[in-house]
Image: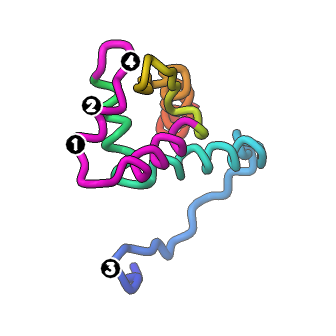
Amino acid sequence: MNKHILDVPILTTRTACNPSIRPRLNTDEASQMALTFKAISHPVRLQILDLISQGDGLVCGCDIERHFDLTQPTISHHLKVLRDAGFITSEAQGVWISHKVNVELLNALRGVLSMMENGC
């Protein structure tokens, strides 16, 4: 077995070809999924999504901002990225904006990852 520069094993033996496998995601679906995953590729956005997921119903922006040493416009930018990708929904409640996790999107992503894990 050859080693890659990062000591990741590279298999040199060839396995039997399987002509029956096909992409289960078309190009448009794969592109959309990639954009969706890109939205949570930033550590702060993952943390924000985690915070919002802990709220019962809606989480106020002030409850998010206090956990970060970031400006309010920066937090708003991260929330916009999450909202544009469909991870959260937001609604005005007085002077504050409250946010909620889009469970349907999380379930769809879970389904795609499960499909790849289980091969079905």
User: Between disc 1 and disc 3, whose residue precedes?
Assistant: 3
Q: Which element type, helix, strand or loop, lies under badge 3? A: loop
Across and down, in percent, residue 16 comes to 62, 58
Across and down, in percent, residue 46 comes to 36, 44
Q: Distance between the residues labelled 4 and 3?
A: 46 Å
Q: Which residue lies furthest to the front in this view?
A: 95
Could you tell me which residue is drawn at 37 percent across and 47 percent down? 72
Please state which of the two labelled residues, at mark 1 or mark 3, is closer to the viewer. 1
Residue type at the position of mark 1: His
What residue is shown with label 1?
67
> Is mark 4 in CB contact (under 8 Å) with mark 2?
no
User: Between disc 2 and disc 3, whose residue precedes?
Assistant: 3
What residue is shown with label 2?
63
Q: Which residue lies furthest to the bottom in this view?
A: 5
Q: Which element type, helix, strand or loop, lies under badge 2? A: helix
Residue type at the position of mark 2: Asp
Disc number at residue 58?
A: 4
Q: Give the range drawn in magenta.
A: 55-83
> Is mark 4 in CB contact (under 8 Å) with mark 3?
no
Q: Which element type, helix, strand or loop, lies under badge 4? A: loop
User: Between disc 4 and disc 2, whose residue precedes?
Assistant: 4
What residue is shown with label 3?
7
Q: Above or below — where is 11 with respect to 41?
A: below
Relative placement, left or right, of 90 versus 68 is right
Across and down, in percent, residue 51 comes to 29, 32
